[in-house]
Image: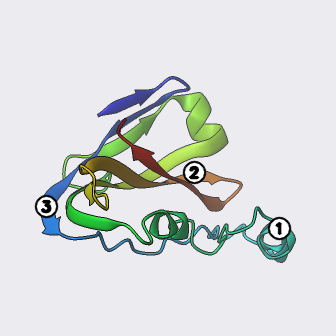
Amino acid sequence: MATIPHGDSVLAQGLGSTVQGAPVIPSVDPTPTGKGVTHTYLEPYRTTPLPPGFDIQNPNAALTDAIKGQTIRSTVVLQVSSTAVDSGIFNIPFVTVNAKATKLDATFWIETVEQPGGTPFMQLQYSQKIILHFFGIDWPHITVGTLIKQ
């Protein structure tokens, strides 16, 4: 459960599991969809120069790149979604009119990483996709990150 200061409240439920080894991180698509999508909206995805190594077609590639070469002993996977039973996103009227959040899906990977000749360390990776609806378009807002426990 979360409350975001600009007017959204989220209740998302899900499942957890533990797997041996590295996580399987699926691709995620950031392409806007809906009746209002035109070539004008999609053109920046095709022509805007991006930082080296950033994959606009799959932001989760940053997560798989971060663990290349690591030896991951185990991973705890936590998945939550606002589409689960008794879950949802609730917005104040101003947000609903201007940029309504309609769906949230998030996955957290808590990894135990083995260092060569050293002690293991914990690492958290996450991928969160929120759909914001405005101008007849569903805009995926994707956030990814890798955090290392110090």
Mark 3: which secondary structure?
Answer: strand
> Where's the N terminus, which quadrant?
top left
Residue at x 67%, y 66% (from the top left corner): 54
Which quarter of the rendered picture does the C terminus lie within? top left
Q: Which mark is residue 44?
A: 1
Q: Residue at x 26, y 59 (%)?
A: 114
Q: CA distance from mark 1 to mark 2?
A: 18 Å
Q: Between residues 95 and 120, which one lies in front from this camera angle?
A: 120
Q: On the rendered structure, is 7 left or right of 24?
A: right
Task: Give the secondary structure at mark 1.
Answer: helix
Which label sits in the foreground, 1 or 2?
Answer: 1
The answer for how far apart the CA atoms under marks 3 and 2 are is: 29 Å
Dot 1: within a 10 Å radius of its alpha carbon, few (fewer than 14), some, or many (20 or more) residues? few
Q: Residue at x 37, y 54 (%)?
A: 106
Q: Earlier in the sequence, mark 1 or mark 2?
A: 1
Above or below for 90 versus 140: above
